[in-house]
C-alpha cells in the first residue's frame, strides 16, 4: 500500500525519470522471472537475427509458452548492440515465424510490448 501511495504523489518529471531509469526491468528480466526454463530462438528462415527482438520458448508450471518482446540495453554499449530497442523492418519476420511455430505446436503466445514514448 505504501508503494502505491508513493507513486500517486509524484510530479510529472519524477514519473519521466522513473520511466527512463536505466535499471528498470527489461523484457528478458520479466521472462526469466516468470519462467522456469527459457530457450531463446534466434533469426528467421531468411538468416537475419534482429538483436532488438527477443523470441523464445519457455515453461511456466509445466506448460510451454512462446515469448516475443523488444529488448533495450541497460548502457550505451548494450543499446547500440540492440539498436536502442528499435527493430529493423525485416526484423519482424522472426516474431511472425515464432507465431506460426506456436500455432503449429499449439503453444500459448505471450508478447511484451515496449513503448519508447511512455512517461
Image (cartoon, rainbow, N blue to C red):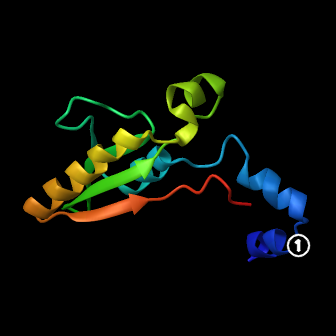
Which sits in the foreground, 85 or 65? Answer: 85
Q: Nearer the viewer, residue 71 or 64?
A: 71
Viewer-proximal residue, 53 or 39?
A: 53
| Side of 91 relative to 45 (left or right) | right
Instruction: Tell me what residue is drawn at x 64 percent, y 48 percent.
Output: 24
Q: How many marks?
A: 1
Q: Is residue 84 above or below residue 24?
A: above
Q: Percent from the top left, x then y, of residue 57?
A: 24, 49
Q: Quadrant of the C terminus?
A: bottom right
Q: Nearer the viewer, residue 10 or 68?
A: 68
- Report x, y in % for residue 8: 82, 75
Is residue 115 toward the left or the right of residue 16 in the image? left
Corner quadrant of residue 15 = bottom right
- Residue behind mark 1: 9
Task: Judge from the rendering whether residue 82 lies leftward or rightward of residue 68; answer left or right.
Answer: right
| Figure check: 21 above or below 84 | below
The residue depicted at 21 percent of the width and 49 percent of the height is 97
Indicate the quadrant where residue 106 lies.
Answer: bottom left
x and y percentages locating residue 76 in the rendered image: 65, 26
**x%, y% of residue 69?**
42, 51
Amino acid at each position: 500500500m505504501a508503494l502505491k501511495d508513493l507513486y500517486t504523489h509524484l510530479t510529472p518529471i519524477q514519473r519521466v525519470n522513473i520511466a527512463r531509469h536505466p535499471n528498470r526491468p527489461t523484457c528478458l528480466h520479466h521472462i526469466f522471472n516468470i519462467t522456469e526454463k527459457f530457450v531463446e530462438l534466434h533469426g528467421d528462415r531468411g538468416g537475419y537475427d534482429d538483436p532488438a527482438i527477443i523470441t523464445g520458448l519457455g515453461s511456466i508450471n509445466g506448460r510451454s509458452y512462446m515469448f516475443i518482446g523488444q529488448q533495450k540495453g541497460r548502457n550505451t554499449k548494450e543499446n547500440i548492440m540492440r539498436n536502442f530497442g528499435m527493430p529493423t523492418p525485416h526484423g519482424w519476420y522472426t516474431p511472425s515465424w515464432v507465431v506460426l511455430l506456436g500455432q503449429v505446436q499449439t503453444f500459448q503466445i505471450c508478447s511484451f510490448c515496449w513503448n519508447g514514448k511512455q512517461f
